[in-house]
Image: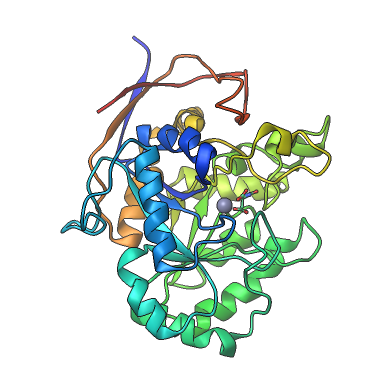
Amino acid sequence: MSKQHTLIMPLDMHLHLRDGVMLETVAPLTSYTFSGAVIMPNLVPPVTSKEAVIAYKERILSACGYEMQENDFMDEDGLGGGDFEPLMTLFYQNYDEGFIEEIQDEIFAIKLYPAGITTNSEGGVKSFDIETMRPTLEAMERLHIPLLVHGETDGFVMDREAEFMSIYELLAGNFPDLKIVMEHITTKAAVDMLDKYANLYATITIHHLLITLDDVAGGMMKPHLFCKPIAKRPEDREALLKIALNAHPKVMFGSDSAPHPQDKKEACGCAAGVFTAPIALQLLCELFDDHGKLNNLQSFVSDNAQSIYGICPEFKEVTLVKEAFKVPEKYGNVVPMYSGETIAWSIEDVL
Ligand code: NCD
Ligand code: ZN
């Protein structure tokens, strides 16, 4: 019999679902195998109001085939009904305290983008002036709302994340009770930062555990592997692998699955984002199995996030099997990572 592995309540702690037809295409692919996902707010326009958060959550649940029930957002166990919970985020701006108090029950976290650094981030933060940001960050700290950060400067593309470390230090040092998540880390510099501050955490994608810049641009240019932050050097990938495979307790899986239509990727001016949602768990099983670390995968894809955020997801049990799976060429008009290639693990069953 083929080797099997069961994961309980997998969570994707960083996910782009988009809107409209794209949302209808991609949302069910995640809700099928994940118990919950942290939903990024970089729509056009970005999600910056209570009404927008609530309406977007409704559209997500409806795209997954669930209807929103009254008061379902936060029930006793901290999560809503159905077997997939979209954990909603608000797009960071310097909001006043009253606004944050009013919206706190509708959001899971606030996501900060430096202005213009990635897809649909133009409305993000232009200057990291701590005094300007203080009222917002202090309110978040007081109300226990985590801050999720896209940590890149506008410097040289390979150095952007490492250059951002001084801003993480500023944020973590000034707001010691604020839970700060360094999203989709790609460098040894970020790995080294993790243990310097008790209030710093990180998410890691599957693609950054598998590829380096060589895979993106070392041979023929691979637009479907192009994303922000860009994949880095082998020693960076090694540092990421070490903490992911050993399920460092401050690290969580966040796919950063970021679908774009095929014509926006295979274009002169390729949009940044790798689409991995439907193959993420299969690839994680393959990677952890190849390193003899399958026993640590449960912590990386669920348990660490549950402890870090204090959440208790809806029950779901996903059994994977070591049997070849041919990745579809496309899902709708989105080309996934490893399109048309065969990967080693498949989804066997979801309960
Ligand atoms: C993301 C997107 O397309 O929204 N792109 C990406 O390359 N990761 C935005 C982001 O998370 O940077
Ligand atoms: Zn992202």
Colour pattern of the rendering: rainbow
What residue is rendered at 31% in x and 58% in y?
Answer: 307
- Residue that lies at the very extreme toward the top in this rendered image: 1
Q: Quadrant of the N terminus?
A: top left
Position of 124 with respect to 77 (left or right) is right
User: In this rendering, does residue 291 appear at all?
Assistant: no
- Residue that lies at the very extreme toward the bottom in this rendered image: 131
Position of 297 with respect to 16 (left or right) is left
Residue 92 lies, in percent from the top left, at 53, 70
Position of 112 with respect to 308 (left or right) is right
- Depicted 133 relative to depicted 147: above or below: below
Residue 241 location, quadrant: top right
Residue 251 lies, in percent from the top left, at 45, 54
Residue 334 lies, in percent from the top left, at 61, 31
Residue 115 lies, in percent from the top left, at 67, 68
What residue is rendered at 40% in x and 67% in y?
Answer: 50
What residue is rendered at 64% in x and 44% in y?
Answer: 273
User: In this rendering, does residue 67 appear at all?
Assistant: yes
* Tally of marks: 0
What residue is rendered at 60% in x and 30% in y?
Answer: 336
Q: Nearer the viewer, residue 34 or 93?
A: 93
Q: Quadrant of the C terminus?
A: top left
